[in-house]
């Protein structure tokens, strides 16, 4: 489109009264630009590996995909592949950072102390580390956390191979710079990864990002003969990069061509996913379907779950959609009920409540320091006001590698305000869990 606009400008600027040679020169340069841009967008993004791994384990989290959302794609895939679809899985937290730190520590949020965003986990707080334990079993470990805007566990948990996105302010700064440029993200994503770069070539939240290539990379990346253990977090639903026209269904195109320009926005980066005024296609609903389609198709077409490849897969989400979530209503199932599906792993009773903390035992690891199943408890707290959040971020420690770390006194305050809730608190059904603890003086939260 930009190229065509330039050609039109050339035609107006160089009217028939001007010398013909100048007109030809101007049009040629524009045509070269158009052809170069078109060829660039047609080039494939190179994946990290080609053949699908064997004897590997993949733990794949999809951000912000609750059980009460339209997740028929995952359910059908589970049925088709003989997966174990847990009907009552409960996430230990409602912020990406707190959930992943809890899973990798195999400890509830209260014990990890990682409860807010912009907080680096303190790995010494738990005697157990999922990554370390997997390495002890002879696996090579890989991390693919597409977006480390507010959580740095993909780079900080000790994986042998870190293919995660840029951290903190670096992710925001680099993706904004790329999205504000013409063709730059397309060019970079088609080139080999630059040595020492902290930003992946195929960077999430840029308009050139290829989700398919990333999922394929999770299923194929390896180095050497050791079996692979890959942990991935797809921030797709929680990232703002409006899809390319070609990726959307043809029926949407005429609708979008008639839409107001300011309605063509993706608010995925906003933690509570506000409604975009004038959004005529319900972009978030489409993205929810698209992420399932891409994940399911890539797993199916790669043959990852074919019996001869002897792979294991655990699929889940870290929390549901958080629209209107606050410190009082976090006990609503829409926030804490999440899909949890396993393939090629021994299954428990899928009708029984289960915490995502039990991912450790589902994938066959033992934690002698916490051998019993975890209580299906969700824990949550967030800042009361946007002003408080802004002051905490401005007063945080900003590091050169991109991380923004909240001050210890801020964390300490919120550890004291953390609330727990066990939706299955029938003592006969599950192990006892902390009861809901009301904190005096809390008000509906509007903080991120
Ligand atoms: Zn999340």
Image: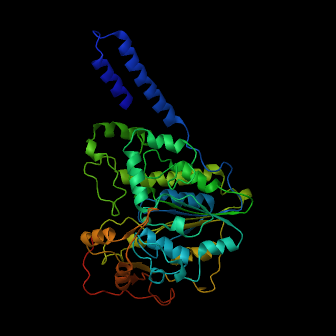
Quadrant that contains the C terminus: bottom left
Where residue 324 appears, as percent x and y from the top left, is 29, 68
Return the x and y of residue 334 as percentages of the image width and height. 38, 69
Q: Position of residue 313 (x, y in %)?
A: 61, 63
Left or right side of 215 for 445? left
Q: How many marks?
A: 0
Residue at point 35%, 75% (across, down): 330
Judged from the image, the quadrant occupied by ligand 1 is: bottom left
Residue, x 37% and y 20% (percent of image)? 26
Q: Quadrant of the N terminus?
A: top left
Residue 242 shows in the view:
no
Residue 258 location (% of width, % of height): 28, 37
Does residue 130 appear anywhere in the picture?
A: yes
Residue 117 vs residue 396, the one in the foreground: 396
State how the image is colored.
rainbow
* 81 on left or right of 177: right
**Residue 275 in the figure: left or right of residue 252:** left
Along the line of sight, the residue nearer the viewer: 160 or 298: 160
């Amino acid at each position: 489109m930009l190229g065509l606009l330039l050609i039109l400008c050339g035609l107006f600027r160089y009217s028939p009264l001007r010398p013909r040679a100048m007109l030809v020169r101007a049009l040629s340069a524009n045509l070269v630009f158009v052809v170069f841009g078109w060829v660039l967008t047609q080039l494939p993004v190179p994946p990290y590996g080609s053949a699908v791994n064997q004897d590997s384990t993949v733990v794949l989290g999809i951000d912000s995909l609750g059980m009460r959302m339209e997740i028929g794609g995952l359910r059908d895939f589970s049925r088709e592949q003989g997966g174990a679809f847990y009907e009552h899985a409960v996430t230990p937290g409602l912020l990406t950072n707190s959930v992943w730190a809890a899973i990798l520590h195999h400890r509830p949020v209260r014990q990890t102390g990682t409860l807010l965003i912009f907080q680096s986990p303190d790995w010494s707080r738990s005697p157990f580390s999922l990554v370390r334990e997997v390495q002890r079993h002879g696996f090579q470990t890989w991390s693919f956390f597409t977006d480390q805007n507010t959580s740095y566990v993909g780079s900080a948990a000790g994986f042998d191979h870190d293919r995660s996105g840029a951290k903190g302010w670096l992710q925001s700064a680099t993706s904004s710079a790329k999205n504000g440029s013409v063709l730059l993200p397309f060019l970079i994503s088609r080139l080999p990864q630059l040595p020492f770069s902290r930003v992946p070539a195929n960077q999430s939240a840029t308009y050139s990002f290829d989700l398919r290539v990333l999922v394929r990379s999770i299923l194929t990346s390896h180095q050497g003969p050791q079996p692979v253990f890959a942990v991935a977090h797809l921030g797709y639903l929680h990232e703002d990069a409006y899809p390319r026209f070609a990726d959307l269904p043809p029926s949407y195109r005429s609708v979008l061509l008639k839409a107001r320009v300011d309605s063509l926005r993706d608010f995925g980066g906003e933690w509570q996913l506000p409604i975009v005024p004038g959004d005529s296609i319900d972009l978030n609903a489409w993205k929810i379907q698209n992420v399932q389609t891409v994940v399911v198709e890539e797993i199916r077409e790669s043959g990852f779950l074919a019996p001869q490849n002897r792979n294991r897969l655990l699929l889940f989400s870290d929390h549901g959609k958080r629209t209107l979530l606050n410190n009082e209503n976090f006990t609503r199932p829409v926030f804490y009920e999440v899909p949890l599906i396993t393939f090629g792993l021994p299954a428990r009773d899928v009708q029984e409540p289960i915490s995502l903390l039990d991912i450790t035992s589902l994938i066959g690891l033992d934690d002698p320091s916490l051998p019993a199943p975890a209580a299906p408890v969700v824990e949550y707290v967030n800042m009361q006001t946007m002003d408080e959040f802004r002051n905490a971020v401005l007063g945080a420690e900003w590091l050169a590698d991109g991380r923004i770390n909240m001050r210890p006194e801020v964390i300490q305050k919120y550890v004291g305000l953390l609330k727990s809730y066990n939706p299955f608190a029938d003592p006969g059904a599950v192990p006892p869990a902390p009861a809901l603890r009301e904190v005096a003086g809390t008000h509906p939260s509007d903080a991120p």
